[in-house]
Image (cartoon, grey):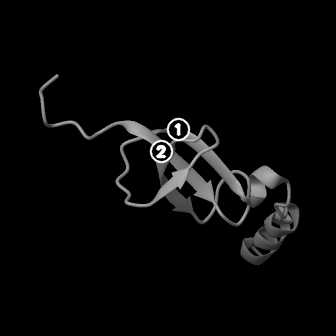
Amino acid sequence: MKKGIHPEYRPVVFQDASADFAILTRSTIKTTDTIAWEDGKTYPVVKLEISSASHPFFTGKQKLLDTAGRVEKFKKKYSKK
């Protein structure tokens, strides 16, 4: 690999404050904020608005839409009279 052209790949904490959820992984994202992790070390932190812990699809709180009613409505509206 060429020297000096690749971003720094380092451990980073992604934190979802609304769900009190955090995960430590590796990333090249730039951030100036830091957080003390469970192992006692300090890592850069990225604050998220939504994650798998707070997204309705993953939490099971997603609302299902009535697609059958929409199909009949479309056929009724655009069928030949």
- Classify mark 1: residues with Cα within 10 Å, few (<14), some (14-19) or many (20+): few
Residue 36 as seen in the image, left or right of residue 29: right
Residue in front for this viewpoint, 44 or 46? 44
Q: Which residue is mark 1?
A: 25
Q: Earlier in the sequence, mark 1 or mark 2?
A: 2
Residue 74 as seen in the image, left or right of residue 31: right
Residue 2 lies, in percent from the top left, at 12, 26
Residue in the image at 34% along x and 54% along y = 30
Instruction: Look at the image and tell me in which quarter the C terminus lies.
Output: bottom right
Residue in front for this viewpoint, 73 or 8? 8
| Disc 2, SS | strand
Residue in the image at 60% along x and 55% along y = 15
Three-letter amino acid code at disc 1? Thr
In the image, residue 10 sits, relative to residue 76, either above or below, namely above
| Disc 1, SS | strand
| Residue 12: assigned label | 2
**Contact, mark 1 vs mark 2 (Cβ under 8 Å):** yes
Instruction: Look at the image and tell me in which quarter the N terminus lies.
Output: top left
In the image, residue 15 sits, relative to residue 78, either above or below, namely above
- Classify mark 2: residues with Cα within 10 Å, few (<14), some (14-19) or many (20+): many
Residue 70 lies, in percent from the top left, at 81, 68
Three-letter amino acid code at disc 2? Val
Looking at the image, the residue that sits furthest to the front is: 40
Residue 55 lies, in percent from the top left, at 72, 58
Alpha carbon separation for disc pair 1 and 2? 6 Å
Residue in front for this viewpoint, 59 or 10? 10
In the image, residue 3 sits, relative to residue 41, either above or below, namely above
In the image, residue 41 sits, relative to residue 32, either above or below, namely above
Residue in front for this viewpoint, 78 or 50? 50
